[in-house]
């Protein structure tokens, strides 16, 4: 029976020892935590040089952060602008290929509107002509008005110069040989014109 009593006493002493060790570990951990906390909260140990160095580091990090934000904002704006430009000019090649067809249509209509000519536009062809112009305009295509305007080398390509019929037409476009066109306000073809001198 004495053997039965010895074992529980031994178990209790082991448990007590483990509890004591755990308590010491907890106390040591708490002491270390409190020391670190005091070092952080109590800046007495920190020198003025260290404080100035930390302030400089903080300012440098703020500056880097602001620069990165500005760069990212500029990147977003640039990509949005490029995307819009791409969408606006995506149809440029197709439009440029359609311009000779429009020129032919305009010449045919001009001949049909001339009373001295026998040709006439049928009502169906007139509807197709008008519909084609509406569709292309809705896609951003605009024809330039050149005749009677002052000659501008950025908009016009001078084919020839002729003596102007009167002084008011000097330096102005007297006749348009081939219409110029813009697509979303960007020139895709310059107007070919005759200029008065």
Image (cartoon, helix red, strand yellow):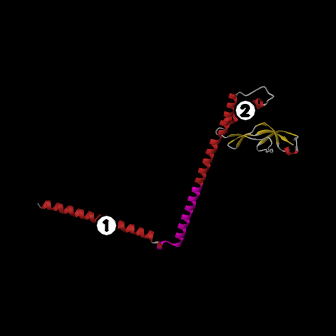
Q: Which residue appears at 24% of the width and 64% of the height? A: 16
- Image coords of residue 36 (percent x, y): 42, 68
Residue 132 occupies quadrant:
top right
Residue 158 shows which numbered tag? none
In the image: residue 43, left or right of residue 90: left
Whole-angstrom CA distance, mark 2 to mark 1, is: 95 Å
Question: Which image quarter is the C terminus in?
Answer: top right
Question: Which image quarter is the N terminus in?
Answer: bottom left
Secondary structure of the residue carrying tag 2 is helix
Q: Which residue appears at 54% of the width and 69% of the height? A: 52
Queried whether the magenta region covers residue 49, the answer comes back as: yes
* Number of residues whose C-alpha sits closer than 10 Å to that of mark 1, classed few (under 14), some (14–19) or many (20 or more): few
Secondary structure of the residue carrying tag 1 is helix
Residue 24 shows which numbered tag? 1
Q: Nearer the viewer, mark 2 or mark 1?
A: 2
- Image coords of residue 145 (percent x, y): 76, 41
Q: Nearer the viewer, residue 127 or 89?
A: 127
Residue 17 occupies quadrant:
bottom left
Q: Which residue appears at 66% of the width and 35% of the height? A: 94
Report the residue that reaches farthest toward the left: 1
- Image coords of residue 6 (percent x, y): 16, 62
Report the residue that reaches farthest toward the top: 118
Label 2–label 1 contact, CB within 8 A: no
In the rendered structure, which segment of residues is drawn in magenta? 44-70
When the figure is inspected, residue 170 is found, relative to residue 29, above or below; the finding is above
In the image: residue 16, left or right of residue 104: left
* Number of residues whose C-alpha sits closer than 10 Å to that of mark 2, classed few (under 14), some (14–19) or many (20 or more): few
Residue 135 occupies quadrant:
top right
Q: Of label 2 and label 1, which has the lower sequence position?
A: 1
Residue 100 shows which numbered tag? 2
Queried whether the magenta region covers residue 95, the answer comes back as: no
């Amino acid at each position: 029976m004495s053997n039965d009593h010895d074992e529980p006493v031994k178990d209790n002493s082991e448990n007590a020892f483990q509890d004591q060790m755990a308590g010491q570990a907890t106390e040591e951990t708490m002491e270390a935590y409190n020391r670190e906390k005091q070092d952080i909260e109590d800046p007495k140990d920190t020198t003025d040089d260290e404080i100035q160095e930390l302030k400089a580091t903080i300012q440098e990090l703020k500056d880097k952060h602001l620069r990165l934000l500005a760069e990212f904002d500029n990147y977003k704006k640039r990509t949005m602008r490029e995307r819009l430009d791409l969408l606006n000019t995506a149809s440029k090649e197709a439009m440029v290929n359609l311009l000779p067809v429009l020129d032919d249509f305009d010449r045919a209509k001009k001949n049909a509107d001339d009373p001295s000519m026998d040709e006439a536009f049928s009502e169906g062809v007139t509807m197709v002509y008008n519909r084609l112009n509406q569709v292309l305009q809705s896609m951003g295509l605009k024809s330039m008005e050149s005749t009677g305007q002052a000659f501008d080398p950025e908009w016009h390509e001078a084919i020839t110069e002729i003596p102007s019929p009167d002084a008011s037409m000097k330096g102005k476009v007297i006749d348009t040989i081939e219409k110029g066109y813009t697509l979303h306000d960007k020139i895709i073809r310059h107007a070919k014109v005759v200029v008065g001198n």
